Image (cartoon, helix red, strand yellow):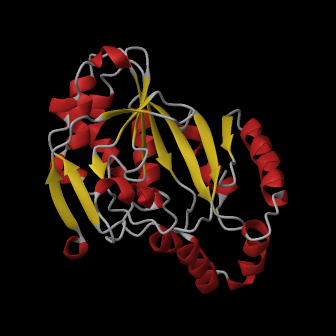
């Protein structure tokens, strides 16, 4: 993997950014780019702002080497929610070397703020000793495919589904609040019921988001369907080319029933690219 990755250490002017997300006041992205190279990723739009031109998203990472020193005046985050990882994974593999996320967390331990972390990597379990020091922290794991061979095709350098579930269990057993983010849900493919059955004892709630097919990921997603599930290609065209939302309406109802069965909150974000 390292042969294909361009790693650059950069200095930034700030690290805490106001958020437009519904459940976060601020975001912290310790890196620019992400090593996971998920074929469905939407975050490559960031290249317009980061000077990476024609570089392929997933082939480069800028390490915000001075992140801790530019945290600035932290009064603004008092009683606010900070999400780690809106356009990068705070625990993608390079974090094992640089520990930018870990060092930021250490600097925020005594601040009266709510921390949320979203990752596809089991590396987060390394920092349980720091995470336990926060009064209000939630650890979330993105997971929408249980089959390891499919996960490798969709999320080549993310932790395997079972490693993520193992880390989820470790976080819960350490007394941390946790959730699973079933995202992106691939129609007729993602094993929603199986994921819930396998993780229900280790989560406080679930979040759900549909796969969105956009200009930046369309070719990769459709090629994946053609190569692995050719019989589903017409159904995908009905959903994404013809705008048939019936599948998502029915799935939403199914999800609500499943979560009610297990007494778990379901936060559903089906936005269909809008």
Seen at 57% across and 81% down, the residue is 223
Seen at 26% across and 40% down, the residue is 101
Nearer the observer, 71 or 147: 71
Is 90 on the left-hand or right-hand side of 193?
left
Is 153 on the left-hand or right-hand side of 50?
right
Nearer the observer, 144 or 98: 98
- 72 up-or-down from 205: above or below: above
- Residue 183 position in % (x across, y down): 58, 53
- Residue 52 position in % (x across, y down): 29, 63
Seen at 76% across and 36% down, the residue is 260
Nearer the observer, 50 or 259: 50
The quadrant in which residue 191 appears is bottom right
- Residue 215 position in % (x across, y down): 57, 68
Quadrant where the N terminus sits is: bottom left
Is 61 on the left-hand or right-hand side of 210?
left
Count of marks overlaid on the render: 0
- 63 up-or-down from 129: above or below: below
Is 141 on the left-hand or right-hand side of 158?
right
Nearer the observer, 176 or 104: 104
- 35 up-or-down from 64: above or below: below
- 227 up-or-down from 198: above or below: below
- Residue 96 position in % (x across, y down): 21, 52
């Amino acid at each position: 993997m390292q042969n294909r990755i361009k790693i650059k250490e950069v200095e930034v002017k700030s690290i805490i950014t106001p958020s437009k997300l519904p459940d976060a006041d601020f975001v912290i992205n310790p890196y620019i780019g992400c090593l996971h190279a998920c074929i469905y990723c939407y975050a490559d739009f960031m290249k317009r702002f980061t000077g990476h031109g024609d570089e392929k998203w997933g082939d480069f990472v800028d390490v915000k080497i001075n992140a801790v020193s530019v945290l600035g005046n932290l009064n603004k985050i008092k009683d606010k929610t900070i999400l780690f990882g809106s356009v990068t994974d705070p625990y993608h593999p390079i974090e094992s070397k640089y520990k930018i996320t870990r060092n930021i967390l250490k600097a925020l331990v005594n601040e009266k703020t709510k921390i949320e972390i979203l990752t596809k990597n089991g590396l987060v379990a390394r920092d349980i000793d720091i995470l336990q020091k926060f009064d209000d922290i939630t650890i979330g794991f993105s997971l929408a495919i249980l089959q390891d061979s499919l996960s490798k095709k969709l999320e080549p350098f993310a932790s395997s589904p079972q490693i993520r579930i193992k880390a989820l269990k470790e976080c819960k057993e350490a007394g941390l609040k946790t959730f699973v983010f079933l995202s992106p849900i691939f129609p007729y493919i993602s094993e929603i019921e199986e994921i819930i059955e396998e993780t229900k004892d280790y989560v406080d709630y679930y979040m759900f988001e549909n796969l969105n097919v956009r200009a930046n990921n369309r070719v990769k997603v459709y090629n994946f369907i053609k190569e692995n599930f050719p019989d589903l290609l017409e159904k995908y065209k009905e959903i994404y080319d013809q705008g048939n939302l019936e599948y998502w309406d029915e799935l939403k109802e199914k999800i609500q029933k499943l979560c009610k069965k297990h007494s778990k909150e379901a936060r559903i974000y089906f936005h269909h690219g809008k």
